[in-house]
Image (cartoon, rainbow, N blue to C red):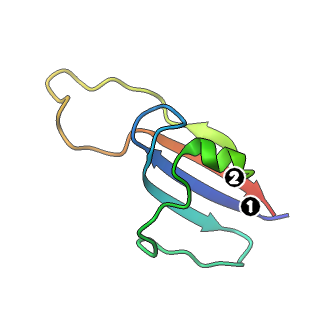
Amino acid sequence: MKQQVLVLYLDNSALDAPVKAWAFYDGTGKTNPTTGDSDLPPYDSGVEALRDGWRLFQASQLIPPYPGHEYQTSFLKHEFWFEKLE
């Protein structure tokens, strides 16, 4: 059995929020995805990934912005990690 990993960066902390960015890693060797190889996300939300059989195994900790930095650009905060075993 081999693992596939899907990382979805959502618009906010809700699992049904729209996908803003994503990454896919295929440990099966069936595909060889690379950054920027698609303009469309594989799913519109994290809930769609769950419905398609992906298992959620990690969500980012919710950390409030440091006072005075509420509007600064930084890392993508709402990161969800999913896996499938093939």
| Direction left: furthest residue | 68
Q: Is residue 26 rendered to the left or right of residue 3?
A: left
- Rendered residue at 32%/45% (across/down): 75
Q: Is residue 29 rendered to the left or right of residue 37?
A: right
Q: Is residue 53 rendered to the left or right of residue 76?
A: right
Instruction: Return the mark for residue 3.
Output: 1
Binning the other alpha carbons within 10 Å of mark 2 as few (below 14), some (14 to 19) or many (20 upward) gives many
Under circle 1, the secondary element is strand
**Answer yes or no: do the residues labelled 2 and 1 have beta carbons within 8 Å?**
yes
**Amino acid type shown at disc 2:** Glu
- Rendered residue at 45%/45% (across/down): 18
Task: Please determine whether, in this image, residue 32 is positioned above or below residue 3.
Answer: below
Q: Which percent across, then down, holds residue 43?
A: 55, 55
**Amino acid type shown at disc 1:** Gln
For disc 2, the marked residue is 83
Q: Which percent across, then down, holds residue 54?
A: 70, 50
Task: Please determine whether, in this image, residue 62 is positioned above or below residue 49.
Answer: above
- Rendered residue at 81%/64% (across/down): 86
Q: Which percent across, then down, holds residue 78?
A: 44, 39
Instruction: Return the mark for residue 84.
Output: none
Q: Which percent across, then down, holds residue 68?
A: 14, 24
Q: Is residue 33 rendered to the left or right of residue 52?
A: left
Q: Earlier in the sequence, mark 2 or mark 1?
A: 1
Q: Nearer the viewer, residue 2 or 56?
A: 56
- Rendered residue at 65%/78% (across/down): 31
User: What's the CA distance linking mark 2 and mark 1?
Assistant: 7 Å
